[in-house]
Image: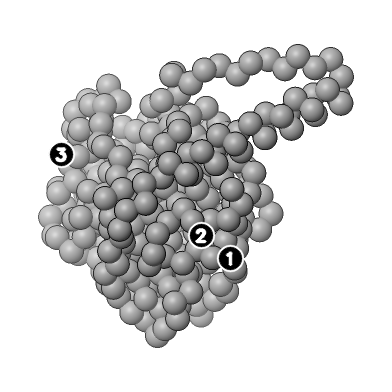
Amino acid sequence: MSELDTLMPAPLDLSGYRLGTPQRAGALTMVPVTGPVRPGFVPPRSGLKLSRVVGYGQVELYNGMPEGVAIVPLHIGYVQDAAQNHALCGSALLAAGQKRVFHDACCVQQSQGGFLSGRDDQWFFVLPVELRARALELRGQRGYSKLWDDIAELNRGYDLPSRGHLEQILSRRRAVLTQFQSRLELVPGQLGAAFFEGDRWAGLEIAPDPGYFAELWMALVCFAYGVAAWKREPAVAPAVPYGATDLAGLRRELDGERAALSERVAGWLSAVPMGPVEAVEEERYLDLRLSTLTGGHLAGQVVTDGGRLVYASLFNRLPVG
């Protein structure tokens, strides 16, 4: 199961990318991805900033680095204290020093009023996977409340008050969700991951380089994919205690457990539907191309450079709620 190029159909070329040893935390399984490093791209936390919230549904991002292109992570959202929280519907390319206002952002906090200029205490998330297909469909459409009904439905599925207020999950359940960050570990050279919720493929994320992915890691593992896994946690069978009585025996049991998980994940990978995928170019910058991919089983966006993959954020069309 080490090769990744058979996971996704054309036009996405994943040759050169490889899968590592799976890690599991409750209902969430993460398979590390290594592959070609594409230098020259600005990482999303240290280089890309929320400059200001211009108005409801309008946010301005800033690539503050003196050089390098910023790939805005797909469905990134920002949380600021006492301000209206927003998420983007699509990715984008920002040149060094460029500011851009996104007029099609989604407000994800129905009952919080006001908006502030950029702050040092801002932190970002990526929309939960159940919301991502709908958010992608809404790109280019103005209307700050356009995702509230879907957020309310998601909240109902988590036995939370039915309102368009994503903060009920992201902030009030943050302590639980951030446990995935410590239970799953980045490996040396990792620049991507395949995520599974239970035995179902949930998403594939690939970054230009390990530094970029490390800065995106928490937003992905805790929020984009951790939310759905957290919901399924009670249904996961408890871990069976190890029977080993010495260190050598424990190592044998751990090796056997890892091998069994790798075999299961290989089966999950082979079960990913392989239907046709349509690619639509959205944006260009020099040789970079940002495209949207849609198919019956997946959706997402990718960035390529002369046909070579640089960035990918693809996800399963999981139902809301």
Residue linked to disc 1 = 16
Is 231 left or right of 186, judged from the image as shown?
left
Secondary element at tag 1: loop
Is 184 left or right of 287, judged from the image as shown?
right
Taking the spot 43% from the left edge, 19% from the top edge, the residue there is 235
Marks 3 and 2: which is nearer the front?
2
Q: Three-letter amino acid code at disc 1?
A: Gly
Q: Three-letter amino acid code at disc 2?
A: Asp
Q: Quadrant of the C terminus?
A: top left
Residue linked to disc 3 = 149
Residue linked to disc 2 = 5
Q: Are marks 1 and 3 in contact (CB under 8 Å)?
A: no
Taking the spot 16% from the left edge, 52% from the top edge, the residue there is 144
Work out whether mark 1 precedes mark 2 in sequence or the reverse, and give the earlier one: 2
In percent of width and height, residue 20 lies at 63, 49
Taking the spot 48% from the left edge, 29% from the top edge, the residue there is 27
On screen, residue 111 above or below 90: above
Secondary element at tag 3: helix
- The answer for how far apart the CA atoms under marks 1 and 2 are is 8 Å
Q: Three-letter amino acid code at disc 3?
A: Asp
In percent of width and height, residue 224 lies at 40, 44
Marks 1 and 3: which is nearer the front?
1
Work out whether mark 3 precedes mark 2 in sequence or the reverse, and give the earlier one: 2
Residue 64 appears in the rendering: no
- The answer for how far apart the CA atoms under marks 3 and 2 are is 37 Å
Q: Which of the two residues, 123 or 253, is positioned nearer the viewer here? A: 253
In percent of width and height, residue 120 lies at 45, 56
Number of numbered discs present?
Answer: 3
Crowding around mark 3 (Cα neighbors within 10 Å: few <14, some 14 to 19, many 20+) is some
In percent of width and height, residue 216 lies at 49, 54
